[in-house]
Image (cartoon, rainbow, N blue to C red):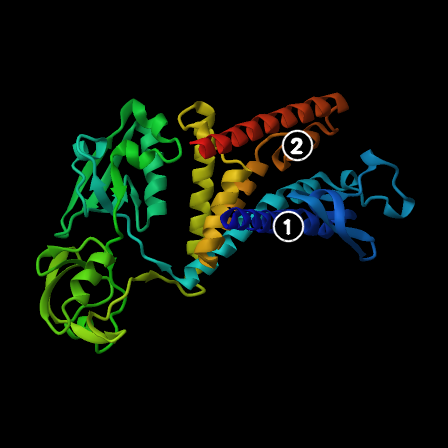
Amino acid sequence: MVDALTNLLAFIVAISVLVAIHEYGHYIVGRWTGMKVLRFSIGFGKPIWSWVRGADKTEYCISAIPLGGYVRFLDEREGPIAPEDEGRAFNHRPIPARIAVLLAGPLFNFMFAIFAYWLISMDGVPALRPAIGEVVPQSYAAEAGLETGDQIVAVGDTDTSNWQQALMAMFDNMVSDGRIPMTLEDLQGRQRQAVIQIGADSTRLTEPGLLFDGIGFRPGSPPVVLDDPIENEAAAAAGMRKGDRVVSVDRQPILGFGDLINAVTERPGERVEIGAIREGRVERFSVVIGTREVEGNTTGFLGVRAMLDELGPVEAIPNAFQETWTQTMFTLRMLGRMVTGDVSIKNISGPINIAQFAGESAQRGLRYFLGFLAMISISLGVLNLLPVPVLDGGQIVYQTVELVKGSPLSERSQIVGQQFGILALIVLMSFAFYNDIARILG
């Protein structure tokens, strides 16, 4: 019950924030281009809270159904225009101004994603490098030679410093030609090439939750990549430094921080040999494990922590743009491949699934919730640019046609287009709700 309430609240917050940003884009650019705004609404249906502001007496309101929003401009097609408002209606403004207003909503979604990724980059993200866990015998992964403990350095031509990059590259390569070429690094620091041959099974493996089971391996514990060791503690005294990847303690493999903690805490004051990969080769350090008191017990203490991918305010800017661009292009490719049948339409998520993701990310912390908002914001931006008449992209097509031919499309053509757009959205929503229910029922 608590989880369901958390999911619902997180979903309402997420949708309200992203819709407000999208509609504010339309609103502010409309005002900049001389249009009169009649209403700015977050949510649909009956207003439950409203107020009127400004010389234009614009009504700002929160409405009962928190699943969208809209900006209503003065428009001659909806009724007569007062003489003092002549030239301020949406359809009276120059076509480039109208197109700018329509583009502004999706553009503000992309701008929000850039801002969110900028904040995340500065805050510092744990450098959770992608690694191979358990490999299932006689699976695609086993046939390709993947081994537990391997770190995924690259997938195809894409360097992979985190699982998000790795997964997007795996999907791209698998869908393109049924192959996933990888560059792997083993526990001895040796790199090798491996190719997972999926073949005609690739479309099935794009269904949610099937990728790892279908390929035949589980994600492993992130490799132990060190940040700056704590000054005057055991690791620093032995010469270990930022970027070292710990792979063994007294020749016993270390696959994750859990292994390292277990190997160290039980050996306070002992001398051990720690193997770490530095600049592509294994270095061995003789380390006298430090001590500390925990609840009256003496435990071993190495004085290390996981490395953070943390950037300064200026350095974070190009990273934020790159993250947004990568996510946008990936979303476009996946949509196109759903249309061609190369990617399962089961990936279309409805409000129930989105609410679950919203709740889970919110419970994990602000950083994760911001990342979720950025991804959903990008999806909203991309979807609204599709050339479907009831969406911004479809309206941009109408305005472009009017610009080229010198007159608006006929009323009949616009009605047919609107009907097609509504039908397309109903079909899309039906798939989304079906997928949500199917996931709940297992």
Identify the residue at horizontal 47%, vertical 36% (top origin).
332
Q: Is residue 310 left or right of residue 89?
A: left
Query: Is 109 placed above or below 79 here?
Result: below
Please tell me how crowded label 2 is: few (under 14), some (14-19), or many (20+) other residues with Cα within 10 Å.
some
Q: Does residue 359 appear left or right of residue 43 in this picture?
A: left
Closer-to-camera residue (254/174): 254
Q: Is residue 384 above or below residue 320?
A: above
Locate residue 60 relative to residue 153 in the image: left or right. Answer: right
Q: How many marks?
A: 2
Residue on which the image places disc 1: 20
Residue type beneath disc 2: Val
Mark 1 crowdedness (10 Å alpha carbons): few <14, some 14-19, many ≥20: many
> Is 30 or 298 nearer to us in this picture?
298
Label 2 or label 1, whichever comes before in sequence order: 1
Which residue corresponds to the image point at 49% horizontal and 49% vertical from the top-left? 3
Mark 2 vs 1: CB contact within 8 A: no
Residue 201 appearing in the image: yes
Residue type for callout 1: Ala
* 340 versus 94 height, above or below: above
At 75% from the left and 23% from the top, the residue drawn is: 410
Secondary structure at numbered mark 2: loop
Whether 204 is drawn above or below 220: the answer is: above
Q: Residue 111 at x, y = what percent?
A: 54, 51
Would you name the residue on which mark 2 appears?
Answer: 390
Quadrant showing the C terminus: top left
Q: Position of residue 69 (x, y in %)?
A: 67, 44
Q: Residue 91's quadrant in the figure? A: top right
Residue at 53 percent of width and 48 percent of height: 110
